[in-house]
Every structure is written in structure tokens, then in C-alpha cells.
Image (cartoon, rainbow, N blue to C red):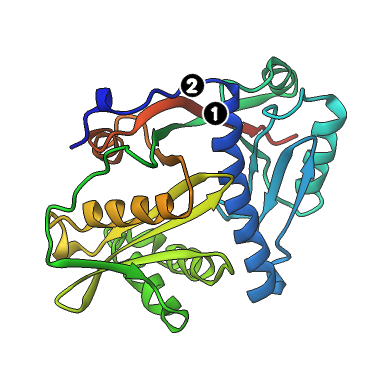
Amino acid sequence: MISVEAQPFLFSDLHLARRLERVEGRSNADFVETRARVSPEVGAAWIEVAGTLAMFDGVHSPCTQTFCLGIFAPVTGGDLDRIEAFYRERGAPVFHEISPLADPSALALLNERGYRPIEFTSVMHRPIGSGVPLPASPNEAIEVRLARENEHELWARTATRGWSELAEFADIMLDLSRVSAARPNALSFLAELAGQPIATGAMTIHDGVALLAGASTIPEARNQGAQAALLQSRLRYAVDQGCDIAMMCALPGSASQRNAERQGFRIAYTRIKWSLAERP
């Protein structure tokens, strides 16, 4: 466990929000571009409107939504018209993930147009870099490494096994994991015990921010420190790449959030996902 008091302090302000939101937006843009390359029949695409990144990865994909709305510029009715048309032309619902630090124009327009809040996400961060203490791995028998070019399928199947209790999402998780691993700039980490893969983690780096995602441990290997080992390895890799901030997202109040807070992450803000009501 890392003492929060021992870390440099980062203010949860607009400057921080722009860095955090942009890395997640870029990560999803890379995902959508990879989908377009490996599965062109999906028609995956993304556009940027006044700093907002609008993603389409298929009608039912959780990646089909926007990021950064109102973070880099005030939102106008014309901006939302363009974004809504982008989704409407593809027969997709309209979702926006919005930081509370977004320009107030975003909230006003969403209310005017009949959007409703449907989901909350804790956006967490912690400083990393020279002199900042990082978590230690509790199990030295677990080895962590980047997946090799020929191990995309191994990484994807290991990640999916970690979500096996959610049987109804098995197919979509395998599909999403395969695309994630195939991204040109993918940082896909494998944790191994006695030479066997037991857990996965992913990371995206942009503008000095390391976004940690893809945490998954196969059921029979849980509670042995695999995720702690993956966290340590990814943070050290990020430091070596010159990053000064690490970022994670979790369901508010979840075990994932508690585990992140134990490792020195603090909540920057709670993001809200908004859905446009279907027109009659």
C-alpha cells in the first residue's frame, strides 16, 4: 500500500481533466482505427468536433460514444448537431461521457435536448516519476512481461477468461480483447505463474499520461497478487517512458476503486454518461 501523503499533490482542475480525458479519447480512437482495419464490415469510424472525439464501433459496442465533450471548448448546438448526425447516419444511439469540469454549455445543451444520465465512473489518478514511491509486488513468483506479436490471441483469451463469470458477455469480451491487442501501439501485459498466463493488463500512453485498463485474472489464480504485479510493472514501464501521471477508471465504490486507492490513486472526479432519449 502507498501512502497518499508521501506523493506529490495534483489539483483536480481543468488542466488535469484535459490530460486525463484526452488519453482515454486517444485510446478509443486507436481502438476504432484498429477495428476498421481488422473488421472493415463494421464500418468503424471516428470524428473530432470542437475537441470532442466521437467514436463508432458498431451499434452495440460499449466503445460507441464520445469523449472530451466540453473539455477543450464550449459546446454549441451546431457541434451537437454534427455529433448526433454522425451517430444517426449509422443507426447508433448517442452517448457522451462527460467530466464535471467540462464547460457549463455542455450540461445546458444536454438538458435542453432531452439527454438523461445513465452511468457514473470514478476517474482516478496518481503521480508517478522520479522519486515517487511505487507499489511493490507481493508475489515474486509472478512474472510480468509485454505480450509478443504472435501472442495477441493468447492475451485476448486470457483476458476473457478473467471475465468468465459474466457468461452473457463472453463473446463481446473476446471480440473487444482481440481488437485491443491488435492496436499498433498496444501495450498488452501478461502475468505468468510457473510459465502459465494467469492475468492481463493493458496500458495506453499519451502526453505523459499512462491509462491503465484491461485488468483481468483467471478465476483459479485470483488472490495471489497477479493484479498487484501487473500494476507495478505497468507503472514502472510508464515511468521509463517519461510519464508523470497514471490513470484508472472504475465503478464508484467498487472493489476495483478500493484496490486502486490502496495503491495511491485518488479520485479526480466522477464522470457521468449521458444518453439521448430516442425520438418518437
Task: From the viewer's side, name the closer residue of 145 and 252.
Answer: 145
User: Few, some or many C-alpha atoms within 10 Å of disc 1 (few <14, some 14-19, many ≥20)?
Assistant: some
Find the residue positioned furthest to the front: 131
Q: Which mark is residue 12?
A: 2
Relative image position of residue 207 (x, y in whole percent): 59, 45
Relative image position of residue 89 (x, y in whole percent): 82, 51
Q: CA–CA distance between discs 1 and 2? A: 6 Å
Relative image position of residue 74 (x, y in whole percent): 77, 22
Residue 39 at least partly seen: no
Element on which disc 2 rests: loop
Q: Residue at x 69, y 36 (%)?
A: 278
CB-based contact (under 8 Å), mark 1 and mark 2? yes
Relative image position of residue 253 (x, y in whole percent): 30, 30
Classify 249 as above or below 171: above
Q: Which residue is mark 1?
A: 16
Quadrant position of residue 217: bottom left
Task: From the viewer's side, name the closer residue of 152 and 211.
Answer: 211
Amino acid type at mark 1: Leu
Classify 149 as above or below 273: below
Task: From the viewer's side, name the closer residue of 127 and 83.
Answer: 127
Whether residue 113 sits left or right of residue 178 in the image: it is: right
Query: Quarter holding the N terminus?
Result: top left
Amino acid type at mark 2: Ser
Q: Residue at x 23, y 44 (%)?
A: 135
Find the residue positioned furthest to the bottom: 150
Classify 102 as above or below 93: above
